[in-house]
Structure formats: C-alpha cells, structure tokens
Amino acid sequence: MQILQFIVPSRSAIAHLRFVFSLFLMPVYFFAYSQALVINAGSALLVFLIWHVLAFPASNGYNSYFDKDEESIGLLDKPPVVDISLYYFSLLLETAGFLLGFLVSWQFAFAVLLYGIMSKLYSHPKTRLKKYPVISFLTVFFFQGAFIYFTTYTAITGTTLFAGWNTGFIMAGAICSCLIGASYPLTQVYQHGEDGRRGDFTISILLGYKGSFIFSGALFATAILLSFFYWQQHHMPDYFYFFLFCSAPVFVFFNYWFYKVGQSTSNANYKNAMLMNFISAGCMLFYFLAIAILSGHVLV
C-alpha cells in the first residue's frame, strides 16, 4: 500500500504540489539564462525541468503536508485535506530531481539536494524555520533568489560554482533575492490568523499589515537600484529603462492594494495577494524573457 502511495499521488496531493506556483519563480531562471554568454541547450532544458517540475513542486507539497492548511494558500482558495501520498510523492519528486541533476553536473545535483534540505528545515515540525520570522525570511530570500540564480547560471553554462565570481554575478543574484524577498511578506499578509494559530511567527506578522507593504516596497526599490548599477556596469542602460517600463503595472497595483489595506485590513486577502503575485511574476517573466531573446545566445 505504501508503495502505491509513494508512486501514485492522490488528487489532493497533485493539487498541493501547485505546479503553477513555479511560475512565480521562473523569472530567476530566465534572468540567469539571459545573462549566459554560451548555453548548453540540453542542460538548460534539464535545469528548467528539474527546478520547475520537480524541486519546486516537491517543496510546495512537503510544506503543505506539514502545514495542513484549512484556509487559502498560494493558488488554492480551498485547499483539499492532505494525505500521506503527498508526503511520499514529494520525496519521490525531490529524489528524481537530485538524480537527474547529475546529468547536468554533480554541483547542480547537490544544489538541488541542498534546496530540498532547506525546504524541509523550513517546514518540518522539529525544525520549523517558518516559526522564526527573520530566519525564515532570510532562508527564502537567499535560496529562492540568489542561490537559484547562481546554480542555474553555472549549470546551463557548464561552468563551476567555485570560479567566475565578480561584482556583476553577485549583483545579479542580489537582484533576484530582492525581487523574491519583496513578494514574500505579501504572500503571507492574508494568512496572519491561520499562521498565528499554528504557532508560525512569520515576517508579515512581525511587520504587521502596513509594515509588510513598506518592507516589500523597500526591497523592490532596492532591486530597482541594483538593476540600475548592474546595467550601467554592462553598458546597457536601455535594459534598465525597459525594467522600469515592465515594472509599472507592479508599482500601480502595489500602491492601489496598499491604499485599500490602509482603508480596511479585510483587503489583505487571498484574492488580492494572488493578483499581486501574478502581476509581478508576469511582468518580471516578460522582462527577463525579452532580454533573453534580445541577448542572442549561442547554443552548444
């Protein structure tokens, strides 16, 4: 019976894997792709599939299994009751991602493994980093931002993580972390009640409704500032202005939502949070895809 639960997930388990949620993390991959001078096409495709079809959904599922949410979570307005197949299938996806990672490089395989370990520390009741606002924020800030950028870039270019570090490389990772960090508190702002009842003291609870928006706005502003310096360093100022153009819808809805929450905290709800996520992810994905096309890569 356990073997079937390991291999065949229930409909509830499939829902909790939230494959579409990977859309919110795709801009990081495509930023790395856009900045690579030479790309191994096979590795690029495999890295994309490992992150977005295996590792990220596995992390979502593992987190959901231990959260056992009864109220809305990302992309699930009414989450179904979790079952043991979610736990086993999440581990299966993660194992598959780790093993397939060796087809790219041993460094990338262990990067996938480390990401999985950190997701477990974040979620598991014995460690539950999610209980600690600063630690949980920094974990997501680095591992869904700069870490994914650094490991993706080196994997698809066939280079090593132990060489090639420069200010531009580090700055690009920092931009990704700031963009991820700006979204993170706003994904929690409608969950204060359930998170509090479960004992999770999230960064959004720590900051409060107003503070969550101010903190997110500050991080997004930092991403804009870093983007300015990054493209100046690369002598491509037009890419920065294009970034501002693509960010305009994010800026408009963010301020509108902030104003509405100032009127009533009931507006800090699931519907607005998901709309904010889709607008920001859609705009950033369009931006990084566009500059990837404009970069004119060489495939080998």
Image (cartoon, rainbow, N blue to C red):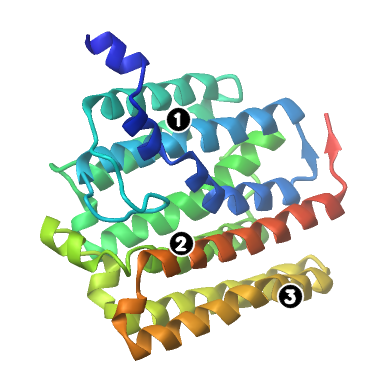
Label 3 near label 2: C-beta < 8 Å? Answer: no
Q: Name the residue under label 2.
A: 274
Inter-mark Cα distance, 2 to 3: 22 Å
Nearer the camera: disc 1 or disc 3: 3
Q: What element carries label 3?
A: helix
Q: Mark 1 points at which residue?
A: 110
Q: What is the crowding at mark 2: few (fewer than 14 residues within 10 Å), some, or many (at least 20)?
A: some
87 in relation to 291, above or below: above
What residue lies at 31% left-to-right and 68% top-to-bottom? 190
Residue 136 as seen in the image, left or right of residue 178: left
Q: Which of marks 2 and 1 is nearer the N terminus?
A: 1
What residue lies at 33% left-to-right and 54% top-to-bottom? 73
Name the one closer to the observer, 209 or 126: 209
- Residue 245, label in figure: 3
- x then y, percent, for residue 264: 32, 86
151 in relation to 180, above or below: above
Is there any visible trace of residue 159 in the rendered image?
no
Looking at the rendered structure, the kind of residue marked 2 is: Met
Q: Is mark 1 on a helix, strand or loop?
A: helix
